[in-house]
Image: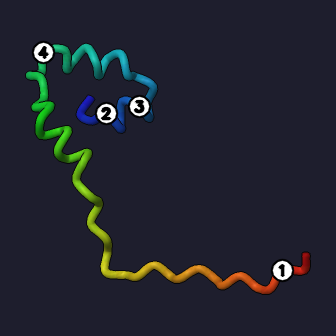
Amino acid sequence: MSSLRKARDSGKLEGFIAEHEDDPEGDLDKLDAALKCPVQESGSTVPSSSSQGASDD
């Protein structure tokens, strides 16, 4: 099993976990920095929302 995606799709998560039990632990500082990093926006712009019309209240 080479990837988590393949293991998940084939229903063999236990085998994937067993194969990776001895993997070194990740760097939590790098993970935190990546999670807190703002998402880069693509070159496309987000369309503006439509304006609200007059209320009939």
| Residue type at numbered disc 2 | Leu
Residue that appears at 20% across and 39% down: 32
Element type at mark 3: helix
Mark 4 to mark 1 CA distance (whole Å): 63 Å
The crowd level at tag 1 (other Cα within 10 Å; few <14, some 14-19, many 20+) is few
Residue 52: x and y in percent read 71, 82
**Placement of the N terminus among the 4 image quadrants:** top left
Element type at mark 1: loop
Residue 14, picture quadrant = top left
Residue 33, picture quadrant = top left
The numbered mark at residue 8 is 3
Q: Which residue is label 2 attached to?
A: 4
Mark 1 to mark 2 CA distance (whole Å): 52 Å
Q: Can you name the residue that lies furthest to the right here? A: 57
Q: Earlier in the sequence, mark 4 or mark 1?
A: 4
Element type at mark 4: loop
Q: Which residue is label 4 attached to?
A: 22
Nearer mark to the viewer, of 1 and 2: 1
Q: Earlier in the sequence, mark 1 or mark 2?
A: 2
Residue 40: x and y in percent read 26, 66
Q: Which residue is label 1 attached to?
A: 55
- Relative to the observer, which residue lies in front, 30 or 49? 49
Is there a contact, CB below 8 Å, between mark 4 and mark 1? no
| Residue type at numbered disc 4 | Asp
Residue that appears at 24% across and 48% down: 36
Mark 1 to mark 3 CA distance (whole Å): 50 Å
Residue 3: x and y in percent read 27, 35
Q: Earlier in the sequence, mark 3 or mark 4?
A: 3
Is there a contact, CB below 8 Å, between mark 3 and mark 2? yes
